Image (tube, rainbow, N blue to C red):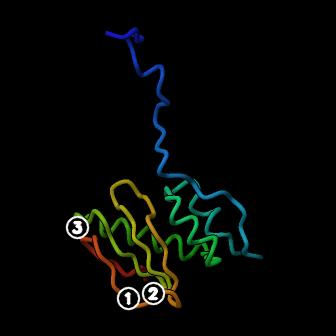
Amino acid sequence: MPNRPADDTAIRPQNVDPHRTHVPSRGRGGGSREGFREILEGELKVTIHARERMNKDGVDMSRDQEDRMQVALDRVAKRGGRQSLVLLDDLAMIVNVESRTLITVVPGERRGEGVFTDIDSAVIAD
């Protein structure tokens, strides 16, 4: 048997998921609007894919929109949703409800055929 520490947790970072990251703060909104990145940084995990989409498409969200999204996630969680399509104004977002992780963001002008797969629920954030 190779020489290994008795506790191999010492050689691996704890609570680190290399596939998920927070979006860096650099809000683009002015006045009373905050950037989507600033709003979500502490409240919702964001995948690298979603972060890249938001940066590419210039997605910003107001505090009101973020609040409506959180309420919608609470509603779908109560009904047992795990992977949900969240429709919010002109945005379609896929969110892992249990881990509160934003998987992808699709603005209205980029929806293409409007087909979303691998979801078990949908919620309108109104």
Residue 61: assigned label: none
Categorize mark 3 by other alpha carbons within 10 Å: few (<14), some (14-19), many (20+).
few
Q: Amino acid at mark 3?
A: Arg
Residue 111: assigned label: 2
SS of the residue at dot 1? loop
Residue 90 in percent (x, y) is at 50, 87
Categorize mark 1 by other alpha carbons within 10 Å: few (<14), some (14-19), many (20+).
few
Residue 79: assigned label: 3
Residue 120 in percent (x, y) is at 24, 71
For the residues labelled 3 and 1, the Cα–Cα distance comes to 24 Å
Q: Mark 3 against mark 2, which lies toward the viewer? A: 2
Q: Earlier in the sequence, mark 3 or mark 2?
A: 3
Q: Amino acid at mark 1?
A: Gly
Instruction: Give the side of residue 36 with respect to residue 74, left or right.
Output: right
Categorize mark 2 by other alpha carbons within 10 Å: few (<14), some (14-19), many (20+).
some
Front-lying residue, 63 or 108? 108
Tell me the quarter of the image containing the C terminus. Answer: bottom left
Front-lying residue, 92 or 116? 116
Tell me the quarter of the image containing the N terminus. Answer: top left
Q: For mark 1, what is the residue?
A: 114
Residue 76 in percent (x, y) is at 30, 69
Farthest residue, direction right: 31
